[in-house]
Amino acid sequence: MHELSLAENILEIVRESVSSNGGGRLKSVKVRIGELAGVVPDSLDLCFTALTKGTELENAKLDIERCGIVAHCRDCGIDSVVEGMTFKCPACGSGNIKVISGNELQVMEIEVDDECSNS
Ligand SMILES: [Zn+2]
């Protein structure tokens, strides 16, 4: 249950951020997930919904941004997005590449509706 613990981590970050900003109602959370992170977005979304149900964070939207695998070719020196799981340099076809991104698992943005504090 990788997604469940991930959703718990996200909620922990969200709760801290919301309370340090003086409260308010959470509208949405934007997360970035790399293709190599091994996270199923639909599953993460389900876990997020289940965990927020009945809490003050209910109805908040989880916005998942996927990002591809970027690899650096040691032969031609080009950084490129690798399609699928081929792990070959698209420019020269070399397999001598190093993955430089694709493991991302980050909370990018937390949107809070602070209407309550204005009234
Ligand atoms: Zn290359």
Image (spheres, grey):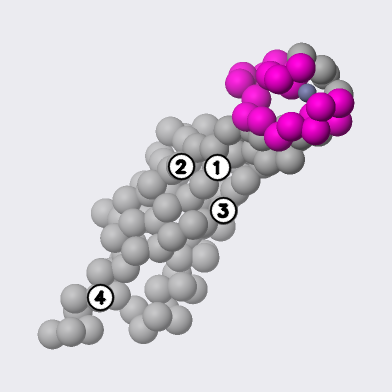
Provide the secondary structure element on which disc 3 rests.
strand
Q: Earlier in the sequence, mark 3 or mark 2?
A: 2
- Residue denoted by label 2: 65
Tags 2 and 1 in contact by the CB under 8 Å rule? yes
| In this rendering, position of residue 42 left or right of residue 39 | left
The answer to whether the residue bearing label 1 lies less than 8 angstroms from the nearest atom of ligand 1 is: no
Residue 84 in the magenta stretch? The answer is: yes
Q: What is the spatial separation of the Cα atoms under label 1 and label 3, in whole angstroms?
A: 7 Å
Dot 2 amino acid type: Glu
The answer to whether the residue bearing label 2 lies less than 8 angstroms from the nearest atom of ligand 1 is: no
Dot 4 amino acid type: Asp
Q: What is the spatial separation of the Cα atoms under label 4 and label 1, in whole angstroms?
A: 27 Å
- Residue denoted by label 3: 106
Q: Which mark is residue 33?
A: 1
Q: How crowded is the residue under tag 1: few (<14 C-alpha within 10 Å), some, or many (20+)?
A: many
Q: What is the spatial separation of the Cα atoms under label 2 and label 1, in whole angstroms?
A: 6 Å
Which quadrant: the C terminus? bottom left
Q: How crowded is the residue under tag 3: few (<14 C-alpha within 10 Å), some, or many (20+)?
A: few
Tags 2 and 4 in contact by the CB under 8 Å rule? no
Residue nearest the viewer, comparing 53 with 36: 36
Q: What is the spatial separation of the Cα atoms under label 3 and label 2, in whole angstroms?
A: 10 Å
Q: How crowded is the residue under tag 2: few (<14 C-alpha within 10 Å), some, or many (20+)?
A: few
Q: Earlier in the sequence, mark 4 or mark 1?
A: 1
Residue 64 point in image, percent of width and height:
43, 43
Residue at 86% from the left image edge and 30% from the top image edge? 74
